[in-house]
Amino acid sequence: MILSDADIRRRLTDGDLIVEPIADPELQIQPASIDLRLGREFLEFQRTNIPCIHPNSEQEVDEYVEETYVEEGEEFILHPGDFVLGTTKERIEVPPDLLGTVQGRSSLGRLAIVIHATAGIIDPGYRGQITLELSNLGTAPVALSPDMRISQVIFTELKTPAESPYGRERGSKYQDQTGPQASRIQVDDEFGGGQLDR
Ligand SMILES: Nc1ccn([C@H]2C[C@H](O)[C@@H](COP(=O)(O)OP(=O)(O)OP(=O)(O)O)O2)c(=O)n1
């Protein structure tokens, strides 16, 4: 069951679901979702001389990304074909019986802005800001302003609460992240790597 605005408000008041700061509940709480705003930090991907990035090399991943901060009153210009990581301004805490799904907003989709290139699941038990995988599939640069409503999250009630919510399961490498967080897939190696034994 997907939470309606009434369910969302009740959960937020009860305090088991946390989404904060919500600047304007009337505007941000939609009929069955919450709009999330764009933060000021971005991770851009640099041109690199490395022949390829090995996802399990923390050093190569760190050298590949560069942090940018958009000052008050400034915009972030997302050029055609660009891919950057952004962040929501809001921090979320998902209780064990809910699953969040991050979606783009139609109004930005109509400008060819994709909010999450691949991953959009916010696990039960997850705490932190959401890293947005932003790309521009269009032909014109698009100006993104911090604080603009950039994405929306819907919450689905699970039939039974997760037994091993995020943060308690092995891995959970993005728990309590603040700002955009580059891939930490190399942490998988500590837990047997991406290649699991059959
Ligand atoms: N666009 C997204 C999607 C997810 N998350 C956060 C919330 C998720 O609960 C957490 C982990 O997401 P995934 O399970 O999709 O990622 P991984 O499987 O790579 O990570 P892990 O092994 O930690 O589960 O990251 C995020 O910040 N931004």
Image (cartoon, grey):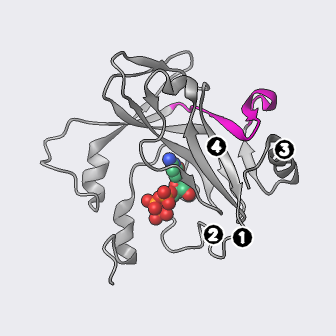
Assign a secondary structure to mark 4.
Answer: strand
Give the mark nearer the N terminus: 1 vs 4.
4
Q: Residues within 10 Å of mark 1 (few under 14, many from 20)?
A: some
Return the residue at label 1. 161
**Magenta highlight on residue 175:** no
Q: Could you tell me if residue 103 is visible in this image?
A: yes
**Magenta highlight on residue 29:** yes
Query: Residue 48, position in %: x, y?
Result: 18, 40
Please tell me whether residue 140 is drawn above or below residue 29 in the rendered image: above
Q: Which mark is residue 153?
A: 4
Return the residue at label 3. 9
Give the mark nearer the N terminus: 3 vs 1.
3
Q: Could you tell me if residue 173 is visible in this image?
A: no
The answer to whether the residue labelled 3 contacts the one labelled 2, judged by CB atoms less than 8 Å apart, is: no
Single out the mark in the foreground, 2 or 1. Answer: 1
Please tell me whether residue 45 is drawn above or below residue 111 in the rendered image: below
Given the image, on which type of amino acid does mark 4 rest?
Answer: Val
Quadrant where the C terminus is found in the figure? bottom left
Residues under labels 2 and 1: Cα distance?
Answer: 8 Å
Q: Tell whether 197 sits left or right of 16.
A: left
Give the mark nearer the N terminus: 4 vs 2.
4
The answer to whether the residue labelled 2 contacts the one labelled 1, judged by CB atoms less than 8 Å apart, is: yes
Given the image, on which type of amino acid does mark 2 rest?
Answer: Pro
User: Where are the magenta residues, as a range?
Assistant: 22-40
Quadrant where the N terminus is found in the figure? bottom right
Q: Who is closer to the viewer here, 6 or 85?
A: 6
Q: Residues within 10 Å of mark 4 (few under 14, many from 20)?
A: many
Residues under labels 3 and 1: Cα distance?
Answer: 20 Å
Query: Residue 171, position in %: x, y?
Result: 48, 70
The answer to whether the residue labelled 4 contacts the one labelled 3, judged by CB atoms less than 8 Å apart, is: no
Given the image, on which type of amino acid does mark 3 rest?
Answer: Arg
Residues under labels 3 and 2: Cα distance?
Answer: 23 Å
